[in-house]
Image (cartoon, rainbow, N blue to C red):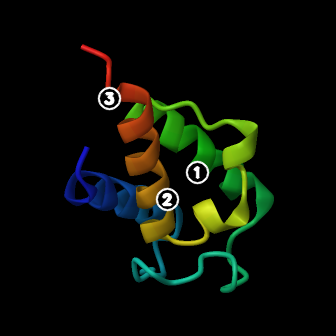
Amino acid sequence: MELNEITPRTRAFVARSFKNYQFQDDEDLFATGMVNSLFAMQLVMFVEREFQVAVEDEDLHLENFRSITAVSELVRRKKTAGNGSSS
């Protein structure tokens, strides 16, 4: 799956949650102080549901969810590793 498919869908999810603020793709979501643990869990569930990937315990690092770009990269890595042999 290409980043050009993942990033816009991730950006749209974040935008729905923060209607009065538009995050840049590389902006640290957590540094703004607007993101809480509930949103973090919603973001994990969005990734699993939207992109059909399993977020494992070892994936649950802030670096993987810090920005829209970081989430997109995580999904790309998971899709590449997990679906390379699937038909």
Q: Callout 2: few (<14), some (14-19), or many (20+) C-alpha neighbours within 10 Å?
A: many
Mark positioned earlier in the residue sequence (1 or 3): 1
Task: Name which of mark 3 and mark 2 comes first in the sequence.
Answer: 2
Q: Which mark is residue 71?
A: 2
The numbered mark at residue 43 is: 1
| Residue type, numbered disc 3 | Gly
Q: Position of residue 20 (x, y in %)?
A: 48, 79
Q: Compared to 84, does 79 lie above or below?
A: below
For the N terminus, which image quadrant? top left
Residue at 41% x, 58% y: name it: 72
Question: Secondary structure under badge 2?
Answer: helix
Mark drawn on residue 70: none
Nearer to the camera, 19 or 38? 38
Whether residue 73 sits left or right of residue 30 in the image: it is: left
How far separated are the C-alphas under marks 1 and 3? 24 Å
Q: Secondary structure at mark 3?
A: loop
Q: Nearer the viewer, mark 1 or mark 3?
A: 3
Q: Quadrant of the C terminus?
A: top left
Residue contact at pointers 2 and 1, CB within 8 angstroms: yes
User: Does 31 appear above or below 73?
Assistant: below
**Nearer-N-terminus badge (2/1):** 1
Q: CA distance from mark 2 to mark 1?
A: 9 Å
Q: Which residue is mark 3?
A: 84
Label 1: element kind: helix
Q: x, y percentage for residue 85? A: 32, 20
Residue name at image x 71 percent, y 65 percent: 62
